[in-house]
Amino acid sequence: MLKRVKFTCVPVQDQARALEFYTKKLGLKVFTDQPMGEARWIELKSNGAETMVVLFKQPSHKPSSDTPALVFVADNVQSTYEELKAKGVEFVQPPKKAPWGEHAILKDSEGNLVLFGT
């Protein structure tokens, strides 16, 4: 039987640029970073999470303009938004309340949408 999600892949064109964004701006920690052929195998971990985020090199990647590639839970959406905005993170939607909770949507260094909410 399936037990848990080990990792999810976020397609990126430039792994070094994406690694800097996800570690320096979003605060994820490197779990592993090793050569994988012409690319690297980069797994990142968020505090308290079991599931890793893999920055998977895909040179021809075209990010979706309406579907988030990744979704995080935040303790406080407004303060997380303010902290990330101060670091220069680009947002396509500031904090917004919906029937299912508060959320905001940002763009990563590769143009992928990332949602975080309660």
Image (tube, rainbow, N blue to C red):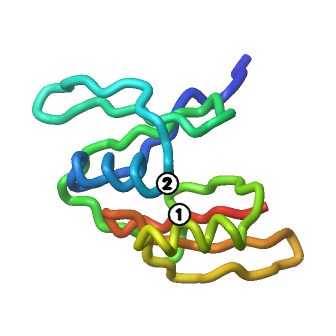
Q: Residue at x 50, y 58 (%)?
A: 69
Q: Is residue 33 left or right of residue 51?
A: left
The kind of secondary structure element at disc 2 is: loop
In the picture, which quadrant includes the N terminus?
top right
Q: Where is residue 100 in the image (x, y as percent from the top left)?
A: 86, 69
Q: Return the residue at label 2.
A: 26
Looking at the picture, tell me which residue is in the foreground, 25 or 18: 25
Task: Give the residue type that dot 2 points to.
Answer: Leu
Choose top left, top right, bottom left or bottom right for residue 37.
Answer: top left
Q: Position of residue 96 (x, y in %)?
A: 73, 82
Q: Is residue 4 above or below residue 53?
A: above
As drawn, the residue found furthest toward the top would be 1
Distance from disc 1 to disc 2, alpha carbons, whole Å, reads 10 Å
Q: Residue at x 54, y 69 (%)?
A: 67
Q: Is residue 87 above or below residue 16?
A: below
The kind of secondary structure element at disc 1 is: strand
Mark 1 closeness class: few <14, some 14–19, many ≥20 residues within 10 Å: some
Mark 2 closeness class: few <14, some 14–19, many ≥20 residues within 10 Å: some
Q: Label for residue 114?
A: 1
